[in-house]
Image: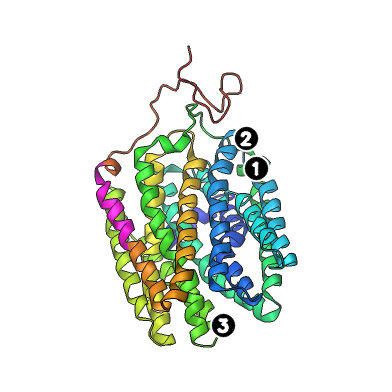
Amino acid sequence: MAAGYLEILRARHAARLLAGTLVGRLPNGTAHIAIVLFTRAEGGSYTLAGALAAAYGLATAVGQPLLGRAVDLYGQPRVQCPAAVVSALGMSLLAVTGLSSLPLAYLAVVIAGVATPPLEGGLRALWPSVLKGEGQVHRAYAMDAVAQEIMFTVGPLLVTLLVSLWSPAAALLVINAIGVLGALSVVLSEPSRTWRSAPREAHWLGALRSPGLLALLGAFFFVGLALGSITVAGVAYADEHGRESVYGWLMAALGLGALIGGLGYGARQWAGAPEKRLRVIVGLLALGYLPLALTPSVPVMTALAALAGVFLAPAIACSFIVVDRHAPRGTDTEAFSWLVTTFGVGAAAGTAVAGPAVELGSTAWSFAVAAAGGVAALVVLLATGNVLATPSRTPSVVTGSENDRNGAVEPGFSSGHKA
């Protein structure tokens, strides 16, 4: 499988697009960690930290599909680059003003969240134009998921390192400056500049008119909830053990486990429908979260965190294929952005619930939220098995195209039919 990954990376532009996207997504991938650490350093409570992180997550959830649809309509450079700059300015506002004014703090994280560029969905939309054949594209999805876990492994360590060397405010500024550079690397590339979405049926629901996609999004809301709760629970666990570095190690272990799982998942060709495979993977993911509620010693907890992460990357990689099978034609960036959105909403819910769980119960209670999220995700996939079993695409006869400048209706409104 290593040879297959190398083949993809040797394709023209592939390595640049993957690296640029990962670097550009660093602010979003570490935002919940950075916000929680910043709030705690400023004297804020766990509940406030969770609320600010939740506000960021919800704002991201609103912005991603809207910006994703804009990318499908107007191209990547005209959307991704301005969004990255505005998002960085929002986080900079939080870093400079702190918690002296809570309304301003909430405004800052909302601006940063809404403007988060949909680089993740954009990359998956670019793969077919860079690679040859469906097999390579699906392998790129697996590689993409593995590469994300490198970011989720290195990102927490980088944030905690910046906090240790300077301050949480400096960490926010540096991470977001790096993110803008990553976004620029992507949008200045030839594939990003020349990419255009396939024509799409003009419909106000966009990608959400696919029942299969809706079922997948419902399940991954709860996966996001599990991950969001671990963000707050990990900080509480580290505080109990008197070392800030414990948090970084727990998050890095979670990412390392996902990295190992992703490499193992991509080491073979899988037969059968990906929807059925996804149910098995999510079930194993839920099972891995259960032992975290035991909150044992730091070495054991670190090992359990690594084990809990093993099935995360496979679940993500498999979900990419499912999205690809169920997204209506011409909605690729938007559909993948909706997947990011469900993670954001779920993570926001997880952080919002885990904060009070720590203060009203214990650290173990907040880790129990993660286990409950994994189980709920599995239940959704089982309950919607019939819907997911039938991949749906827009019919080949397209009555109206939002991408057709001569015959399109205004985006966001249904055209009914065209003569």
Q: Are marks 2 and 3 in contact (CB under 8 Å)?
A: no
Report the Cα–Cα distance between label 2 and label 3.
Answer: 44 Å
Which percent across, then down, holds residue 177? 71, 61
Res. 211 image quadrant:
top left
Identify the mark nearer the N-term, 3 or 1.
1
| For discs 2 and 3, the disc positioned in front in the rendered view | 3
Residue 310 in sight here: no
Secondary structure mostly seen in magenta is: helix
* Secondary element at image label 2: helix
Q: Quick one: 168 or 264, which is closer to the camera?
A: 168
Q: Which residue is mark 2?
A: 74
Which percent across, then down, holds residue 408? 56, 22
Q: Quick one: 36 or 402, which is closer to the camera?
A: 36
Which percent across, then down, holds residue 400? 49, 22
Instruction: Tell me if mark 1 has few (under 14), some (14-19) or many (20+) residues whose alpha carbon lies within 10 angstroms of its own.
Output: many
Report the Cα–Cα distance between label 1 and label 2.
Answer: 8 Å
Residue 46 in sight here: yes
* Residue at x 68% of width, y 68% of height: 99
Q: Amino acid at mark 3?
A: Glu
Identify the mark nearer the N-term, 2 or 3.
2
Q: Which residue is mark 1?
A: 79
Q: Which mark is residue 269?
A: none
* Residue at x 61% of width, y 23% of height: 405
Report the Cα–Cα distance between label 3 and label 1.
Answer: 37 Å
Residue 260 placement, left or right of 390 = right
Range drawn in magenta: 375-386
Q: Amino acid at mark 1?
A: Val
